[in-house]
Image: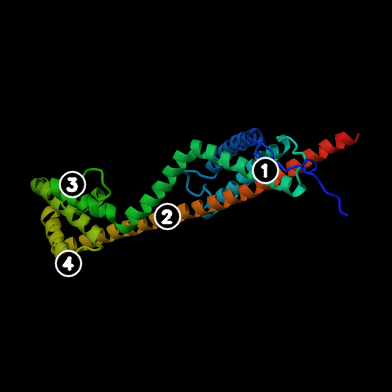
Amino acid sequence: MGTVLSSTDITPVSESSSSAVSWGPIVAGAFAASTLTVILMLVGSGLGLTMVSPWTGSSASTTTFAVSAAAWLVVVQWLSAGVGGYLTGRLRTKWVNVHTDEVYFRDTAHGFLAWALATLLVAGVLGSALSAALGTGVQAASSVGSGAAVGATAPKAAATDAPSSGTWTDYFVDSLFRSANTAAAPANEQNGPTAAEQATRILLAGAANGEVSPEDKAYLAQLVAARTGLSDADAKTRVDAVIAKVDDAKVKAKQAADTARKATASFALIGALSMVIGAFIASVAAALGGKQRDDQEALILTR
């Protein structure tokens, strides 16, 4: 006959009341990782400034600078996440009566949580600067690239009946009315403001629409001939030359906006990739630190 067990011989399985998450080591590792991140970012900023110079030919190329910045982001995440995760694993208390696989999982989770908390801390410190950088790049790409900035300026100038001073078109307008005969300039000076205002509005409207219409070109040539004393053919040649400069400036502005857009997109993607690498490194480092901590304690107990 089999042995009959009474209810008193069966010990019910009860779950531990203590949490599997040790927040102390997580917070300590997060502080260490975030502090090291700030230090490394400052070092990277200093190294980056050494690559940029206002002197022609003294600065690194855009490609070299972008690759260096991307590599440094990965290095920052690698070092800071590794240190934070390792400290998190080494500082936690030993879990008793827990399977080895469960210990490995908990250590990995602790490293990930330490990395996540450190990321939030760094984002709170550097978040405003990063948002400003990304916002500037996106705004430049959307406004300049589509010509919205020029198109928005044209109605404003027309409504006020006066050219806005200090705009990028002032130089081109001035070049239209450089008199070929300096002695005749004072006599025509009373017509200067009206002609300049009309020419400014025509150039702004042409830049917003993509081209200056033939009627506007003919009218500009008439204004230039009346103001400068040039012949009709010379005035038309000057108008065509200035319009070509305006178009060239627009192309360069669009190229600069497109470069800023690509740089912003690349920076965002590389930043996300570096963060994924950091999460992985922190998890592995925490598991390694926890294993070394348990091995050291087991070695002490066997002595």
Q: What element carries label 2?
A: helix
Q: Is mark 3 on a helix, strand or loop?
A: loop
Could you give the CA–CA distance between mark 3 and mark 4, rounded to whole angstroms?
22 Å
Dot 1 or dot 3: first in sequence order is: 1
Please report the residue visible at 56 percent of the width from the left and 50 percent of the height from the top.
70
Relative to 31, does residue 171 appear above or below in the rendering?
A: below
Q: How many marks?
A: 4
Number of the front mark, 1 or 2: 1
Could you give the CA–CA distance between mark 4 and mark 1, rounded to whole angstroms?
66 Å
Which residue has dot 3 on it? 163
Relative to 99, does residue 38 appear above or below in the rendering?
A: above
Could you give the CA–CA distance between mark 4 and mark 2, rounded to whole angstroms?
34 Å
Number of the front mark, 4 or 1: 1
Q: For the residue marked with disc 1, what is the amino acid? A: Gly
Instruction: Locate the C terminus by quadrant.
Output: top right
* Nearest the eye: 128 or 248: 128
Residue 82: which disc?
A: 1
Number of the front mark, 2 or 3: 2
Q: Residues within 10 Å of mark 2 (few under 14, many from 20)?
A: many
Q: For the residue marked with disc 2, what is the amino acid? A: Arg
Image-based side of 54 in relation to 220, left or right = right
Dot 2 or dot 3: first in sequence order is: 3
Q: Where is residue 285 in the image (x, y as percent from the top left)?
A: 70, 44
Could you give the CA–CA distance between mark 1 and mark 2, rounded to whole angstroms?
32 Å
